[in-house]
Amino acid sequence: MVSAWLLWSDRVDEVWLVPTYDHPFAKELKPFTARVSLVEALAKTVGPKVSVCQVEKDLPQPSYSLQTLRHLQNLHKSHSFHLVVGADVLLDVGDWHRWDLIVEEFDPIIVGRVGYDSVDGSPQFPQISSSKIREMLASGEDVSHLVDKSSLKSVVGLYGSLG
């Protein structure tokens, strides 16, 4: 939803989805290639201006958002990059590596999330996350209304059953 809104509202010309290779906060992750496949399927449902960038697999680990953004900017000098995050993330930016420089160099786009302060110029997106979907799968709940049809089978195969 966020990718489509970014394009529809002309906030960006393209959306590059960048799966993390090794999470800086030591979250347990499924294999990178499996997660990339899920994100690629999702990108196809939004359209040709949404793509998947696997750059983090080639960067020193853990790869912090600032490092990834700077690397992309150096590779693609004619582009202007922004980090897109939900308003829920703002509660944790004190734990991020150099959030101040991300703000200074990459002008983040903050999108609204239900349950958090509203963001000027952004709709309130549902408070649904990959973590919530994994929790729902683990408890046997149906997530078919939250996951695009082309990815549902893969998500269930990777994270659990529909019950």
Image (tube, rainbow, N blue to C red):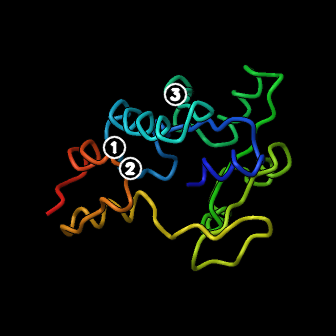
Q: CA distance from mark 3 to mark 2?
A: 21 Å
Which type of secondary structure does the marked residue at label 2 adopt? loop
Specify the amino acid type for callout 2.
Asp
Q: Residue at x 38, y 50 (%)?
A: 148
Residue 89 position (above or below residue 16): below
Task: Identify the residue shown where x is 24% and y is 62%.
Answer: 137
Which amino acid type is shown beneath numbered disc 1?
Answer: Ser
Q: Return the x and y of residue 7 as percentages of the image width and height.
A: 69, 45
Q: Which residue is mark 2?
A: 148
Residue 91 visible in the picture: no
- Mark 3, other Cα within 10 Å: few <14 / some 14–19 / many ≥20: some
Kindly report which numbered mark, 1 or 3, lies closer to the viewer in this rendering.
Answer: 1
Q: Relative to 85, is 77 above or below?
A: above
**In front here: 145 or 76?**
145
Across the whole image, how many numbered discs are drawn on residues?
3
Image point 64% across, 56% down: which residue?
Answer: 85
The residues tagged by marks 1 and 3 sit, at their Cα atoms, a distance apart of 19 Å
Residue position marked by numbered label 1 in the rendering: 151
Label disc, if present, on residue 54 of the rendered structure: 3
| Nearer the observer, 35 or 163 | 163
**Residue nearer the viewer, 153 or 37:** 153
* Left or right of residue 103: residue 95: left
Left/right placement of residue 87 relative to residue 100 reads left
For marks 1 and 3, the one nearer the N-term is 3
Position of residue 72 measured from the top left corner of the image (x, y, whole percent): 70, 28
Q: What's the CA distance linking mark 2 and mark 1?
A: 6 Å
| Residue at left offset 33%, top offset 47% | 149
